Image (cartoon, rainbow, N blue to C red):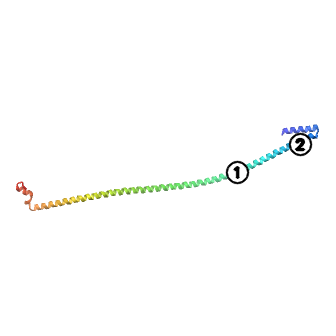
Amino acid sequence: MAAAATVSRRKVAGVVAGGGLAVYGAYWASQAGVVTALERQREDLETKVFVSQSKARRAESDALETEALIGALRQQSDLDSAVASEIAAQLEAARAEVSRLEAAQQQRRDSAARAKREAAEAAARLEQLRLDAVQFKADASKADAALGIAAAEVAAARQRMSNPLKHPLVAQWRGGGKT
């Protein structure tokens, strides 16, 4: 601007010194060109300011939309966290139920194995009792046979006792060792 003012003073001085109307007209024509250029620059700057302000408003609007979106996402995240917590609690409860059912099933398996083992032991005892019964029956038959033999011997002994002279030892004694 200082350079333009210096040029203007020189031109005015030239007009005054020369006194010519042509120089004065040329000066004003050049000044009109400068004014037109300045007006164009001002309009360009106003357009740039308007565009910048529009961009700023758009950026502010985008920022508000982004903040609203962030708020909605936070709410959704909080809701998702609550749902995830609920699902985790349900999953933990399901795991506890599965553990309880597995423990109950293991108890049933243990009870079944114990019952099977006890049944096998009872079957073994029953088989032993059956074998013992067979043995007792065989022993009873042997005892019965021995009892029959003993009864026959008792009867023979009684017979001999009723007639002692017919006893073989007596006969041996009488006969001098002959029977």
Q: Answer with left or right where residue 86 lies relative to residue 37.
A: left
The mark closer to the camera, 2 or 1, is 2
* Residue 121 place in picture, x, y as percent: 34, 56
Q: Which residue is mark 2?
A: 29
Q: Quadrant of the N terminus?
A: top right
Q: CA distance from mark 2 to mark 1?
A: 48 Å
Disc 2 residue type (three-letter)? Ala
Q: Tell me: 93 left or right of 13.
A: left
Looking at marks 2 and 1 on the same chain, the residue that comes earlier in the sequence is marked by: 2
Element marked by disc 1: helix
Q: Residue at x 40, y 57 (%)?
A: 112
Q: Quadrant of the C terminus?
A: bottom left
For the point 26% across and 58% down, the residue is 134
Amino acid type at mark 1: Asp
Quadrant in which residue 108 is drawn: bottom left
Q: Disc count in the image?
A: 2
- Write down the quadrant of residue 3 in the picture: top right
